[in-house]
Image (spheres, grey):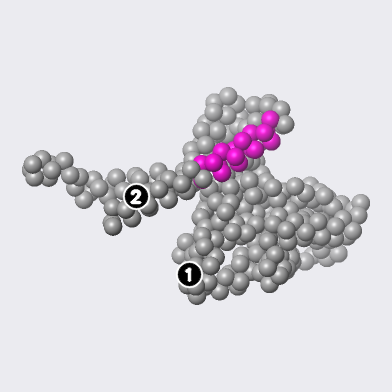
């Protein structure tokens, strides 16, 4: 009997491979990655121009802004909060960027980027302050600031718009020039996503955000300054929305009072589809970025396949519901697994 057991028991190498395979299959980003690859393959098979160099460039450019916003939103959502004002922050910063270039056309681009990021961080910090110190749910706070920021932008911009001809050529070239085939603004967004991913996975303060989202009371008992961490998450999210606003002004032909309207829901959708738990505590900025790419690719694919745009919204809605159901089922299965393991250890 002991000989048979020895023969059937997997060796250390085999057990390690099985463990790595299991860990890979449990990745929250895996389903959305598989869906993205399948979508690209099917669309390219039907329309070969979809993967042409210009087609690939358009795909990357279209996803860049959403990647930045989804990465910032992830930092907020993992703390069991949400920021619905990111579209309004983007709109304010984008119009502010156009105003800066109209008043000072020779201002260095790097300085405009800093001003935009700082403006966004200021607005994000306002959300954080109201959420943390007023002890009001972030859903309510940011729903209010969504309308406040939008109203300010409407009053500031009025009927005015800034077009591509109003900005310096070098600024517009950020969305035209490429580095190894990748648009400059996309390279910048990818760098930001990687830095955030490393921070959340490796830094103590980054892991604290997950602890807060998993159990806020336990995080306090563990000595985590939850107020400071949540405030920082909102501030960083605002800064990234500000950066996205500046890049938006570079990417698109016009910015005005309605710039960024409705983006907030797409951003939350991208994060959730990318595996970020809407109730906090889990998810990665890499997954959120892939979710943003998937949602933009769906739009481009359905357009390439000449599917009515109204079906695009319906498909995105189905994806969100599916992602939430999968997340719920995975949570229940994980909880069951933990109970069974604790039962065996008694």
Name which residue lies at 54% across and 28% down: 42
Q: Secondary structure at mark 2?
A: helix
Q: Determine whether 152 is above or below 323 in the image.
A: below
- Tell me where residue 117 sits by quadrant: bottom right
Which span is picked out in magenta?
Answer: 311-327
Q: Nearer the viewer, mark 1 or mark 2?
A: 2
Question: Which residue position is annotated with label 1?
Answer: 204
Q: Local crowd at mark 1 within 10 Å, few (<14), some, or many (≥20)? A: few
- Tell me where residue 80 sits by quadrant: bottom right
- The reply to whether the C-beta atoms of the residues labelled 1 and 2 are less than 8 Å apart is no
Q: Does the magenta run of residues contain 317?
A: yes
Dominant SS type (magenta) = helix
**Res. 269 in view:** yes
In the image, taking residue 197 as reference, residue 84 lies left or right, namely right
Name which residue lies at 55% across and 34% down: 40
Name which residue lies at 75% across and 47% down: 262
In the image, taking residue 8 as reference, residue 292 lies left or right, namely right
Q: CA distance from mark 1 to mark 2?
A: 30 Å
Percent position of residue 160, x then y: 90, 53
Q: Local crowd at mark 2 within 10 Å, few (<14), some, or many (≥20)? A: few
Percent position of residue 308, x then y: 71, 28
Question: Which residue position is annotated with label 2?
Answer: 340
Quarter of the C terminus within the rendering: bottom left
Residues 345 and 184: in front is 345
Tell me the number on the disc at residue 13. none
Percent position of residue 193, x then y: 56, 56
In the image, taking residue 240 as reference, residue 261 lies left or right, namely right
Q: Secondary structure at mark 1?
A: helix
Quarter of the N terminus within the rendering: top left
Label located before the other in sequence (1 or 2): 1
Percent position of residue 207, x then y: 49, 65
């Amino acid at each position: 009997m002991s000989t048979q057991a020895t023969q059937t028991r997997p060796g250390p190498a085999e057990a390690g491979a099985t463990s790595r395979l299991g860990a890979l299959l449990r990745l929250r980003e895996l389903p959305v990655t598989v869906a993205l690859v399948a979508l690209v393959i099917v669309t390219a098979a039907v329309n070969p121009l979809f993967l042409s160099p210009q087609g690939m460039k358009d795909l990357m450019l279209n996803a860049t802004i959403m990647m930045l916003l989804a990465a910032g939103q992830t930092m907020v959502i993992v703390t069991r909060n949400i920021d619905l004002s990111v579209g309004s922050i983007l709109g304010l910063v984008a119009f502010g960027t156009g105003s800066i270039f109209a008043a000072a056309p020779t201002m260095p681009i790097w300085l405009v980027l800093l001003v935009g990021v700082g403006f966004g961080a200021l607005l994000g910090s306002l959300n954080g302050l109201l959420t943390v110190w007023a002890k009001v749910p972030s859903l309510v706070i940011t729903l209010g600031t969504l309308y406040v920021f939008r109203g300010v932008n409407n009053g500031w911009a009025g009927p005015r718009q800034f077009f591509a001809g109003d900005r310096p050529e070098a600024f517009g070239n950020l969305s035209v020039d490429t580095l190894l085939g990748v648009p400059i603004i996309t390279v910048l967004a990818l760098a930001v996503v990687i830095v955030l991913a490393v921070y959340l996975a490796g830094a103590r303060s980054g892991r604290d955000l997950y602890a807060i989202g998993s159990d806020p009371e336990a995080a306090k008992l563990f000595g985590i300054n939850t107020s400071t961490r949540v405030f920082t998450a909102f501030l960083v999210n605002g800064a990234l929305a500000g950066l996205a606003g500046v890049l938006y002004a570079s990417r698109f032909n016009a910015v005005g009072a309605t710039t960024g309207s409705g983006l907030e829901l797409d951003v939350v959708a991208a994060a959730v589809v990318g595996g970020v738990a809407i109730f906090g505590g889990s998810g990665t900025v890499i997954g959120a970025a892939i979710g943003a790419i998937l949602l933009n690719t769906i739009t481009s694919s359905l357009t390439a396949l000449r599917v009515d745009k109204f079906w695009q919204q319906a498909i995105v809605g189905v994806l969100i519901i599916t992602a939430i159901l999968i997340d719920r089922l995975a949570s229940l299965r994980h909880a069951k697994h933990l109970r069974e393991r604790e039962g065996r250890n008694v």
